[in-house]
Amino acid sequence: MRAANSSVLPVHAEPHCEQGGLRAVRELELFREIAYGFTDWGSWYQGEITGEYVFGNGNLNSHLVRLKMQPKEELTLNLLYYNFTIDQPASLGITSDDWGDEINFTVDWQVNDNLYVMGVLAALFPGTGAEQWVGGDKNWLHSMLYLTYSW
């Protein structure tokens, strides 16, 4: 991991690359898809669309490039790029292992001691495998706004 600080802008950025990500379930005997935990974006589910809603991290290989920025102590921004391949495409009745590319933009904002806001914008650009599986080639879009208030 490399960190870069800018003297022009008060922004801390941490470019981070991971090769391989999560492997197929058959290769990780201790991996249980239902026993998930969240510590940071991309730490468990790989991709807001692909990992969380489509595959739940099973039968999926992921490659991740991440840029994490913290312009203020209470605000963290993430830009995550994933390249996904399917470990066993035949199990889905398709021939291509190219699932596609996904981009996630996330915001974590601790507004005050009581209010915490998380937001996500995500886009999946389907590869041949995804097109074969769903029968179409349209991009997939996802957004989420999550608020937590404690007293």
Image: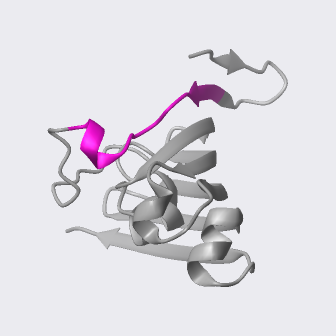
Q: Is residue 126 above or below residue 61?
A: below
* Residue 100 located left or right of residue 8: left
State the residue lying farthest toward the right: 8
User: For residue 25: magenta?
Assistant: yes
Q: Is residue 107 above or below residue 93?
A: above
User: For residue 63: magenta?
Assistant: no
Residue 2 in percent (x, y) is at 62, 15
89 or 14: nearer the viewer:
89
Residue 109 in percent (x, y) is at 49, 55
Can you tell which quarter of the image residue 30 is in?
A: top left
| Residue bounds of the magenta highlight | 13-28
> Residue, x 38% and y 42% (percent of image)?
43
* Residue 62 located left or right of residue 82: left
Q: Is residue 126 visible?
A: no
Can you tell which quarter of the image residue 10 is in?
A: top right
Residue 71 in percent (x, y) is at 65, 39
Residue 84 in percent (x, y) is at 58, 50
* Residue 38 located left or right of residue 18: left
* Quadrant the N terminus occupies: top right
> Residue, x 59% and y 62% (percent of image)?
95
* Quadrant the C terminus occupies: bottom left
Q: Is residue 51 above or below residue 65?
A: below
33 or 99: nearer the viewer:
99
Q: Is residue 101 visible?
A: yes
115 or 81: nearer the viewer:
81
State the residue lying farthest toward the bottom: 135
